[in-house]
């Protein structure tokens, strides 16, 4: 059997010949290499230097205006059997998909350099980590991969030892939306992405590998690859519990992962530690608990709305060595977006500011190394990961969904996750503000049939398992004027505290048909000016609304028949009956 390196070399040779690149550059991940690539991109105009005094080492990239978000309608899962991809994915026959992509890639890199990017998703010595190699003609992608993954020589050494890696081939192509496809071949551990330079479409280690391919792999190997943040919450006694939370894109993961507790909490000695802000790989440990790693090494976060008020941690880490994509700039050449003070001078396309259109693109992003996060957990490089005490699901629900409730057991929690709903956001191309179901926040990212996915989730409930408790939160309830009822951000700490007190068995719940809600007195509202009726609204269960919701969930689940696990439907019926009896 040929060694992994021989296989890798062969693949690189074959691709180089097919795409007819001028040069092949093997990335070692070194500082020198990063400086060299940056200089080339500043020269070509692909990157612009931001104010070096206020933002040393920071650069701006302006995308093609047609290429600013993930493109779900052009993203395919190419399994041999169509049914295995599920109604939750677009499917193409793998033979046809390869033919289509190979035709697009033929001669696509003439005059360009092909970069070979070996990377490791997860701590380099972790048994939970997995490696891949991305071949790309975009130095911007290389620069981002360097911040987002453990990229370079160490990853290559692990690939040589381990023998297995995910193959990703990417070209920005001619950026024609008609000639843009992101194809996944989970059975071959292969990704082919053409025609987009946008993060989620082009940084193949992230959504393509760490979620779509990894979720498929995880099912076969008995672990979970999830669209979740991981946060450590340290109580005044010095004990740290870890929480994993799944919210759809642009619904608050990065913010919660970097939460700064309100005044009183910090005084009492509460601390929040950031492990990950987007992706979580979890595996049952010998002790029966779920142990989690963050496969990423950096953050690719939403810029608009990020400010000293909402996320001071993110602001602190964005002062140096960050890549900004599609933000505006002020007159001093500093990055600017909606939510910051000051005035923009040029919008995200480099045009003068005009009334009525945002200066930064709503999905403008920053890329920054996790090492710059002031609250980075000391456990991030721990090879075995961190033990998860609670799993939290949530989304943007302007009505109905209470601030927080607890599922009564694992199966109920899986139903709560499977029936998650949220308003769509600017993170993906398409309408914004439309309510859609987004199970476990994985609608765009699950690399196989949702019915099989839910069955896989249920399978973790087995003898000896010490599973996390499951909760659902909603920071996005609105009043009749459309204003948020809950202050959110740092104040979400109050909800996290309640969740951890439940985990530690310190407080009871109000039992309702939909699950356990906090007793009003158990939520610490100290220092928060909120009238009693608002809190009451946030913690109310609207029985009629919930009957409609549960019926709607039934219709949604029917769309995945016959692969919906019977346990899930039984759980749904139990809740419907409890609602009828209430
Ligand atoms: P992806 O990185 O795309 O997966 O998204 P994300 O889940 O990390 O979202 P992020 O934390 O970047 O939040 C996106 C938007 O939600 C920003 O506009 C935030 O200001 C807003 N947001 C985050 N947390 C809260 C909150 O607690 N309350 C309110 N009202 N808005 C919030
Ligand atoms: Mn995400
Ligand atoms: Mn994020």
Image (spheres, rainbow, N blue to C red):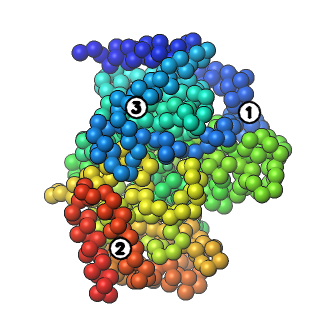
**Circle 3 residue:** 97
| Nearer to the camera, 82 or 148 | 82
Instruction: Answer with mark 2 or mark 1, whichever residue precedes in sequence.
Output: 1
Circles 2, 1 touching at the beta carbon (< 8 Å)? no
Label 2, label 1: how many angstroms apart (C-alpha)?
A: 54 Å
Q: Who's the residue at 53% across and 44% down the image? A: 71
Mark 3 surroundings within 10 Å by alpha-carbon count, few (fewer than 14), some (14 through 19), many (20 or more): many
Location of the C terminus by quadrant is bottom left
Residue at numbered disc 2:
551
- The one of 269 and 196 positioned closer to us in this rendering: 196
Looking at the rendering, which quadrant does residue 130 occupy?
Answer: top left
Give the residue displayed 77% in from the left and 57% down from the top. Answer: 356
Taking 223 as reference, is 261 above or below it? below
Counting from the top left corner in percent of width and height, residue 292 is at 35, 48
Relative to 1, say whether 275 is above or below.
below
Q: Determine the residue located farthest toward the left in the rendered image.
A: 463
Q: Residue at x 66, y 37 (%)?
A: 64
Sequence-earlier tag: 3 or 1: 1
Instruction: In the rendered view, tell whether residue 317 sits above or below residue 457.
Output: above
| Mark in front: 3 vs 1 | 3
Q: Secondary structure at mark 2?
A: helix
Q: How many marks?
A: 3
Q: Position of residue 39 (x, y in %)?
A: 69, 23
Task: Give the structural element (helix, strand or loop) at label 1.
Answer: strand
Is ligand 1 closer than 8 angstroms to the Cβ of mark 1? no
Of the two numbered discs 3 and 2 in the rendering, the one whose residue sits closer to the viewer: 3
Q: Which element carries disc 3, helix, strand or loop? A: helix
Residue 552 visible in this rendered orientation of the protein: yes
Could you say which disc has been placed on residue 49 in the image?
1
The residues bearing labels 3 and 1 have C-alpha atoms spaced at a distance of 39 Å
Q: Residue at x 53, y 35 (%)?
A: 180
């Amino acid at each position: 059997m040929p060694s992994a390196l021989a296989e890798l070399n062969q693949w690189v040779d074959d691709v180089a010949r097919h795409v007819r690149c001028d040069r092949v550059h093997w990335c070692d991940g070194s500082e020198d290499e990063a400086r060299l690539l940056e200089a080339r991109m500043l020269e070509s105009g692909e990157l612009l230097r931001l104010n070096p005094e206020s933002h040393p080492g920071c650069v701006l990239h302006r995308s093609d205006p047609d290429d600013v978000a993930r493109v779900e309608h052009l993203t395919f899962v190419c399994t041999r059997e169509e049914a295995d991809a599920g109604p939750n994915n677009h499917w193409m026959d793998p033979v046809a998909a390869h033919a289509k992509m190979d035709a697009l890639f033929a001669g696509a890199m003439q005059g360009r350099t092909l970069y070979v990017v070996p990377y490791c998703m997860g701590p380099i010595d972790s048994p939970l980590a997995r490696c891949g190699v991305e071949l790309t003609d975009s130095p911007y992608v290389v620069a981002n991969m360097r911040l987002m993954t453990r990229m370079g020589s160490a990853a290559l050494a692990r690939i040589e030892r381990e023998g297995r890696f995910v193959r990703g081939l990417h070209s920005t192509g001619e950026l024609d939306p008609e000639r843009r496809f992101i194809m996944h071949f989970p059975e071959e551990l292969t990704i082919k992405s053409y025609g987009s330079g946008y993060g989620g479409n082009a940084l193949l280690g992230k959504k393509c590998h760490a979620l779509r391919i990894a979720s498929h792999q995880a099912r076969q190997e008995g672990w979970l690859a999830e669209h979740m943040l991981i946060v450590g919450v340290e109580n005044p006694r010095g004990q740290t519990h870890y929480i994993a939370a799944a919210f759809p894109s642009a619904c608050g993961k990065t913010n919660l992962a970097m939460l700064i507790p309100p005044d009183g909490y910090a005084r009492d000695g509460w601390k929040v530690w950031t492990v990950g802000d987007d992706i979580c790989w979890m595996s049952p440990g010998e002790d029966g608990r779920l142990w989690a790693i963050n496969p990423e090494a950096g953050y690719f976060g939403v810029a608009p709305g990020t400010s000293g008020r909402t996320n001071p941690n993110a602001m602190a880490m964005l002062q140096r060595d960050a890549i900004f994509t599609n933000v505006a700039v002020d007159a001093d050449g500093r990055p600017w977006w909606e939510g910051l003070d000051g005035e923009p001078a040029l919008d995200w396309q480099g045009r003068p500011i005009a009334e009525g259109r945002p200066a930064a693109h709503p999905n403008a992003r920053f890329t920054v190394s996790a090492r710059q996060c002031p609250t980075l957990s000391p456990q991030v490089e721990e090879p075995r990961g961190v033990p998860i005490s609670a799993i939290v699901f949530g989304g943007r629900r302007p009505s109905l969904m209470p601030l927080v409730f607890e599922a009564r057991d694992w199966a109920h929690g899986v139903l709560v996750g499977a029936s998650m709903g949220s308003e769509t956001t600017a993170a993906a191309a398409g309408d914004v503000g439309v309510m859609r179901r987004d199970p476990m926040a994985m609608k765009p990212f699950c690399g196989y049939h949702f019915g099989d996915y839910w069955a896989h989730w249920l399978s973790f409930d087995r003898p000896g398992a010490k599973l996390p408790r499951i909760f659902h939160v909603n920071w996005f309830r609105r009043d009749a004027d459309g204003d948020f009822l809950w202050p959110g951000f740092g104040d979400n700490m109050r909800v996290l505290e309640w969740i951890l007190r439940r985990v530690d068995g310190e407080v009871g719940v109000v039992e309702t048909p939909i699950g356990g809600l906090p007793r009003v007195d158990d939520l610490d509202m100290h220092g928060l000016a909120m009238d009693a009726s608002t809190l009451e609204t946030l913690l109310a269960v609207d029985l009629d609304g919930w009957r409609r919701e549960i019926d709607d969930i039934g219709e949604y689940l029917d769309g995945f028949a016959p692969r919906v696990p019977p346990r899930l439907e039984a759980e749904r019926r139990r809740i419907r009956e409890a609602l009828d009896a209430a």
